[in-house]
Amino acid sequence: MRLRFQRSLDDLKEKLLVMAGMAEQSIQRAVEAYRVRDLSVCDLVDHGELAINRFEREIDQMALDLLAMEQPMAIDLRFILAVIKINADLERVGDAATSISDRVRELEAFPVADLPVDTPKMASLAAAMVRKALQAFIEADANIAESVLAMDDSVDKLNETAYFTLLNVMKTQPHMTPQALSALMISRSLERVADHATNIAEDVIFWVRGADVRHYVPVNQPRPA
């Protein structure tokens, strides 16, 4: 019975990792579509989203079946709960890729604009967070997961910089407003990808250590009023 249960856990983990690869690929494709303005790549993102959604349903069902039939305890229970939560975040990473793809399609009606924001850098950081969070999951390594949490501030700062820079572009160069607005939405989508990577890292820490680090505030930092 225990051997069968362990195999089921391994199957669940394997399926989640396949979905993770698809979600990461979707983000990479969406950013590449934006960089080169290639609508055929947008089509790949859209097809990938359908597969990601299917995997999300299948993984949830597998996890729920294990909870109902096996009634796992301790670390196995935490693992299944973490998988359910990570599954949802990966699906939202796919949604973010689709959102970027949609912006690329909208930009087709406007000339290419050279905007003063480093979208590729932000995309690279967000994708690196996803990869590292998944590495932490594969290796059951809470220390790697903690390093992901430390990366989130960099993406937040890039998103904030992009926000004010692009607002200024819209104010001073109104003819570039559509391009700037799309870049602003893409920046926001990438910031959400980083947030989902952070969530995944937190779930890995919960699985491995049994510690809930969501909304953590350091001891020497005052809590908001």
Image (tube, rainbow, N blue to C red):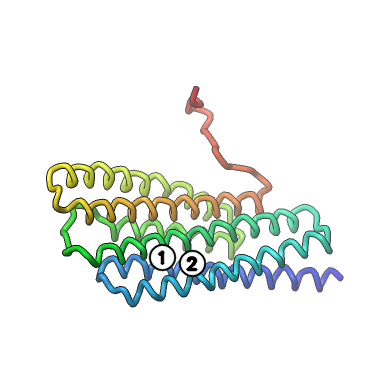
Q: Is residue 39 above or below residue 188?
A: below
Name the side, left or right, on which 21 lies relative to 56: left
Front residue of 141 and 160: 160
Mark-to-mark CA distance, 2 and 1: 7 Å
Q: Residue furthest right?
A: 1
Direction front: furthest residue: 109
Instruction: Count numbered badges in the picture.
Output: 2
The image position of residue 178, as x and y in percent, is 23, 54
Q: Is residue 48 above or below residue 91?
A: below
**Residue 73 in the image: x percent, y percent?**
80, 54
- The amino acid on which the numbered mark 1 sits, given as a three-letter code, is Ile
Residue 196 rendering spot, x and y as whole percentages: 50, 53
**Residue 86, relative to residue 173: is it above or below?**
below
Above or below: residue 192 compared with residue 69 = above
Instruction: Tell me: 203 left or right of 130.
Output: right
Q: Which residue is mark 1?
A: 27
Quadrant in the picture for residue 35? bottom left
**Residue type beneath disc 2:** Ala
Q: Quadrant of the N terminus?
A: bottom right
Q: Which mark is residue 23?
A: 2
Task: Give the residue displayed 67% in from the left and 63% down from the top.
Answer: 60
Q: Residue at x 50, y 50 (%)?
A: 198
Q: Secondary structure at mark 1?
A: helix
Image quadrant where residue 77 sits: bottom right
Query: Which is more toward the observer, 59 or 49?
Result: 49
Q: Residue 192 at x, y = what percent?
A: 43, 51
Task: Name which quarter of the figure residue 42 lies in.
Answer: bottom left
